[in-house]
Amino acid sequence: MPQRDEDQDPSDVDFFAPPKAKSQKAEVETSASSNKDKEGTKKYKAKLLNEEECRQLLKSHRLKFTVLQGQRQEVVEREGQGKKKKSKKEKEKKEGENNKKQNQQQQIFPQPLTAFGQLKYDYGISSLISDNITRQGFRMPTEVQMGSLPLLLQSARALKKANGVEGLDLEKGVDFLAVAPTGSGKTITFLIPAIEGIVKRRKEQNKETREEEEEQEPEHILEAIVIAPTKELASQIVNEGRKLVVGTGVRVMLMRRGMKLYAEEENNVHSLKEDDSGGEEEGKNDEAEEESDEESGDEENKGKEKSLAKVDIVVTTPKTLLNFLTNDGTPGMKKILPTVRNLILDEADVLLDPIFRKQTMGIWRACAHPDVAITCWSATMASNVEALITTHLQNRAKHFSIPLRPLIRLVVGLKDTAVPNVTHKLIYTATEPGKLLALRQLLHPTTEDSGPPLRPPFLVFTQTIDRAQGLHDELKYDIPLEAGGSARIAVLHSSLSEKIRAKIMTRFRAGEIWVLITTDVLARGVDFAGVNGVVNFDVPTSPAAYVHRAGRTGRAGREGGVAVTFYTKDDIPFVKSVANVIAVSEKQAGVSEEQGTVKKWLLNALPNVAKEDRKKLKQSGVESRRTGVKGGDKGGISTKSGWERKRENNRKGAIEASKRRKKLQKMEEKTGGGKAESIDGEDWGGLDD
């Protein structure tokens, strides 16, 4: 697991972790001195493991590589030509059998990365990048880093000893799809190859054009784009990237509205079109609203001509970049990005889901370079997303008349499961007021509960913005003044300005905020090193949503995280999918069925949900919570009883009726004492009206 130095960034400090027994600085210094010994040796010959050694090492770390598509499929097609025609049924049956055999044979065993020192000595990455990695305290790679980095840096070398890759064209690398648990270090895994590729290409260009001026400032050409679903995640990626590019001359920037990048007008050369079915039904959740782009500083820049941004890697949300490419919302693609060589989709499953699909595919099609490499990363990946990626890659290969680059998928552990080092709790509260009572018990525990306690800081997830705001209003005075009072509880959602959200994030990372109430805007990718728990005040809308929410705790293998999920009578039809994820996660962690949260009788008792209902739930959440507080509906969060709400409404009605009577009196005076007609055609009938 990656370790960090003691003098690390304050945003990564875990204020609640036990003290470390061993000095990490001493370990880093020892590691650095051993690297110096290696540098002193003039000849260093990298040793490749044979396939059996690779197989054993990869399996022990639960890493599974599969070739999803590549030259091998074309070889199979050519071999099938020339044979006599068969009936349609026989042909389909034969194709099914071939696909099964092919899928079974497509598992491969590339070279693993056993230490970060190998990046410099075995894979030849820049010494500056290697030093930056060491400076951050990373020594031993995580599973996803162990499997991904060799393939992304030098795919031909990584697969040199592997069997079954003879038909793959590895000359220009591979396209890659990684499914790895939350908090496993995916961000630096995709940033290192992107930065190294830019540094390497720049060196090659300097060799060709080296004449009089050698110490000129490097020319910044946009070569890599990282797309993330939220601004918070995009900002985090930029911060990580800047740590890795120190001294390299590579520039990483966050895409903001109004920023200009090098692009060309579309001239019908790049008119790749395809079916993006499903993109028209955009779910109205907080992730979709995240793309509102309400940036406070943009108003100052309106009307001013901006020069092109000098940048090598741009990190962006889909709509921000697409607005630039479509001339601020004009229908149809207007600009293309001919220099981009690397497209990275972080949280690819949500970027290619109906919420963001059209925007993401629009950007992908705008990357007009024939050799653009695509890498997709997430903790969850549905088969329909994989199918969409493979189809688009095939269409690009045909459009540009180029060989189909191999697409390789890495799955770490069990696919689409929550991290096993987190304790999961599923609590039935019957009603909405029961949820509030249960949450207050977590804030003010009175008796010892089974399992580890939920200690601050922790996140509370709700279904909608209105519910997040309502819950904050209910809880903001629950922490006593001597402990910090209402300043210890905050709410964050996409309706807040970017400036306010950034301030809340900073305070939460610094430990000033103990309870952060939010929506799914913070469910994906955002790394909080010190978060001890997650509370799902509202049941997640899908198994993937649960995996990502629960993944905000237990980061990088840290033990002690707790994920609590409340459910009411309204949630019972939708709990089974979440319960299944918890059951698999506990099984993976070695928890027995008797000790686990989800009992077999509970799984059997919970109803199965129809496909159409699952789709509606994923898009809009539980129906009774889709609206905000209005007339005391179920969408609101309130501890007031129905009688209290009715009394308040009657009081408001009485005030309005009094105003109407005064207006009627004035109208009677104007008409000379005649009776005026009732306003709005009705009179108020008293408190019981």
Image: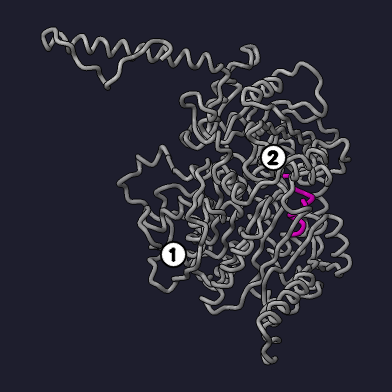
Nearer the observer, 138 or 625: 625
Is residue 562 placed above or below 172 in the rendered structure? above
Numbered range of the magenta stretch: 135-147
Nearer the observer, 163 or 393: 393
Residue 165 in which image quadrant: bottom right
- Residue, far left: 672
Asked if one can make out residue 135 in the rendered structure from this viewpoint, the answer is no
Is residue 554 placed above or below 346 in the rendered structure? above
Mark 2: amino acid: Val
What x and y, as percent, mark residue 517?
59, 30
Residue 140 lies in the magenta stretch: yes
Marker disc for residue 336: 1
Residue 8 in which image quadrant: top right
Horizontally, residue 651 falls left or right of residue 519, namely left
Asked if one can make out residue 511 in the rendered structure from this viewpoint, the answer is yes
Marker disc for residue 606: none
Closer to the chain start, of discs 1 and 2, is 1
Contact? badges 1 and 2 (CB < 8 Å): no
What x and y, as percent, mark residue 252?
54, 51
Nearer the observer, 359 or 335: 359
Mark 1: amino acid: Ile
Residue 267 lies in the magenta stretch: no
Residue 535 in which image quadrant: top right
Q: Nearer the viewer, mark 1 or mark 2?
A: 2
Residue at (48%, 49%) from the top-left corner?
255
Residue position marked by numbered label 2 in the rendering = 575
Which type of secondary structure does the marked residue at label 2 adopt? helix
Which type of secondary structure does the marked residue at label 1 adopt? strand
Is residue 425 placed above or below 74 in the rendered structure? above
Residue at (71%, 81%) from the top-left corner?
90
Residue at (41%, 11%) from the top-left corner?
651
